[in-house]
Amino acid sequence: MTTNRSFTLISRPNGELSDSDLQRHEQPITAPAEGQIQVRTTCLSIDPTIRIWMSDVPQYMPPIGLGEVVRGLGVGVVEQSGHPDFAVGDRVLGLLGWSTHPTLTPALSGVQALPAGLPLSDAKVLSLLGLTAGPTAYFGLLEVGQPRAGETLVVDAAAGAVGSLVGQIGKIKGCRVVGIAGGPEKCAYVTDTLGFDACIDYKSADVGKGLDEHCPDGIDVCFENVGGPIFDEILLRMNLGGRVSLCGLIAAYNEAGKPVPGPYNFGMILMRRLRVQGFIVLDFIDRMGQATADLVQWAAEGKLKTLEDVRQGFDTLPEALRQLLRGEKHGKLVLEP
Amino acid sequence: MTTNRSFTLISRPNGELSDSDLQRHEQPITAPAEGQIQVRTTCLSIDPTIRIWMSDVPQYMPPIGLGEVVRGLGVGVVEQSGHPDFAVGDRVLGLLGWSTHPTLTPALSGVQALPAGLPLSDAKVLSLLGLTAGPTAYFGLLEVGQPRAGETLVVDAAAGAVGSLVGQIGKIKGCRVVGIAGGPEKCAYVTDTLGFDACIDYKSADVGKGLDEHCPDGIDVCFENVGGPIFDEILLRMNLGGRVSLCGLIAAYNEAGKPVPGPYNFGMILMRRLRVQGFIVLDFIDRMGQATADLVQWAAEGKLKTLEDVRQGFDTLPEALRQLLRGEKHGKLVLEP
């Protein structure tokens, strides 16, 4: 008989996530009450924000409570339904959590049915339409960064789930796009497959010199995922009136509890009259239909390529999150339980 | 016979300005060429930005060149004129520099004639209408901070030239206004004379606790002059969608050449989706007439009080700038040469 396997959070990680911060459960599947559905998870999205949710630093959603199933976005198929809007066999996208057969209330978990016949694999659905990937890139670049044709856009974590889409959308909008990524393979992917104008390998090159070379007119828009020394090099080269769309600070996520200094070149915000703006995709939830339509169309036209790093095995979820935060993946990291 | 006394910059200060970074000159007054005027300086504005101009860090105007007269805003009277728009006896405001009898080209030094009969002393002209004071407060708060009635505004350096005006304009616009200043006298001035709702003495009180007490609904707008640990406490209490108008980082100005970390709570920009924006009053130069009209009217109505700390003696200019940066003044620091 099939059981529901899940991971709950039992202590807040100190630095890197430890296996002992989680507890693995194997329990009978819960039948859905009225208004609920029971889903079989087919693919989970492994995102940096999961590490934030595990901590209790101030953040944009409540942290995962101790004893609760680890929060995470996923795609699945409805197996039992007590909800009038969902039928058995429907394909759904939402916060399924680290659970193979969750039973949940759709509205509370942001679960929505996908259009029937959507010609995208589970992994590509998470890459393109998962809130933490495509819509984050779309709104974070276009609404917060407000790039204009001819401007120079710098994207770090350029081979990652969000950065790869940001740079391609920047090209669609007529920008010069320079990526920063770790290692020659990722950089080659960013320029040759994704079509960025250049990519700087921060593992082997001096990022400051690389930016000087590839951004001869300075930087107008920065889509920031990383923070730390790389962001400092970018700040130093921002043009007057430049914009920083602050999407993530992955360099700091493992440092919970330990004060991490802000950018040393923070004063550039003053000197170059920059606008630095944090955002979260949920701010734009009312306009998600527009993002979905554009993203699906651009992907169909071949202008938006995604790459997924698909792992298998429910029990490897903790290790997958650690590898994500170490940069040990190539493309959007997803896991089939 | 009267001579022109001036200070030129001969080396860039390392930390605090040293007397040996400047050279004092005493030379015959230069007759103005065609298109020039010769002015007798009656009052000079001592501003933190002068210390930035002395350094060669990246900044919003060219640094003062070595061998050049120290740049600074002042009020004076035209003594000789080779320019058709200026007559002997006209009262002028502009970048007269650290010079008792400068000869200059008005457009290159931003020198403009003041309206005849303006009922303001030289010191009050610098407080209210000098670019670095009134217009900076006006545009920095209203255009960059965009406060709405009922919101909570926090202003540090609240007893200072800019902060004192920012808080009063915040009250005019219906905000709850909380200041931060150093010492009981300054704090009493901020609440009792300027009408702020509260003022936290950072020298004797825990700024974080003070903010918790006086900003029970969090902080919506921060007008930031200081940086450093005080700004970190403010960042930690910003509300979702809050705005930071970044006007100055006085805590860092003496540290040129030494890396100063940015705010430790930089991540709050992400978590609370803040907008942090640097600005300079020159961005709004086209709308200066509107600022001047409002400022003069509010002052006439008694809604905008200014306090000037008027020093005397041309030779004390270097010490006056040092005292300004140590916070050893009360109100807008000006000097009559």
Image (cartoon, coloured by chain):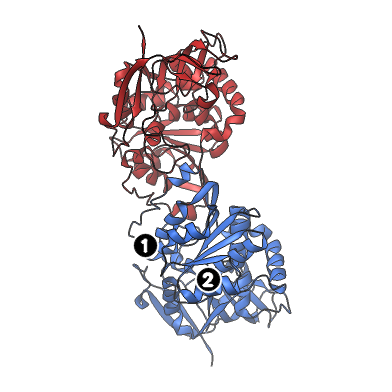
Chain colours: A blue, B red
Q: Amino acid at mark 1?
A: Ala
- Label 2 packing within 10 angstroms: few (<14), some (14-19), many (20+): many
Q: Work out which quarter of the rendered image holds the C terminus of chain B and state it.
A: top left
* Contact check, label 1 and label 2, Cβ < 8 Å: no
Residue at point 41%, 26% (across, down): B191
Residue B163 vertical position relative to residue A233 in the rendered view, above or below: above
Determine which quarter of the picture holds residue A87: bottom right
Q: Where is mark 1, residue-wise?
A: A256
| Closest to the observer, A146 or B196 | A146
Q: Chain of mark 2?
A: A
Coordinates of residue A42 in the picture (x, y in percent): 58, 82
Looking at the rendered image, the disc whose residue lies closer to the viewer, 1 or 2, is 2
Coordinates of residue B1 in the picture (x, y in percent): 35, 6
Q: Where is mark 2, residue-wise?
A: A159
Residue at point 50%, 19% (across, down): B93
Locate residue B297 relative to residue B26 in the image: left or right: right
Q: Is residue B97 visible?
A: yes
Please, what secondary structure does the residue beneath circle 2 have? loop
Q: Chain of mark 1?
A: A
Q: How far apart in space, not on screen, are marks 1 and 2 (Cα)?
A: 25 Å
Locate residue B46 relative to residue A147 in the image: left or right: left
Nearer-N-terminus badge (1/2): 2
Determine which quarter of the picture holds residue B102: top left
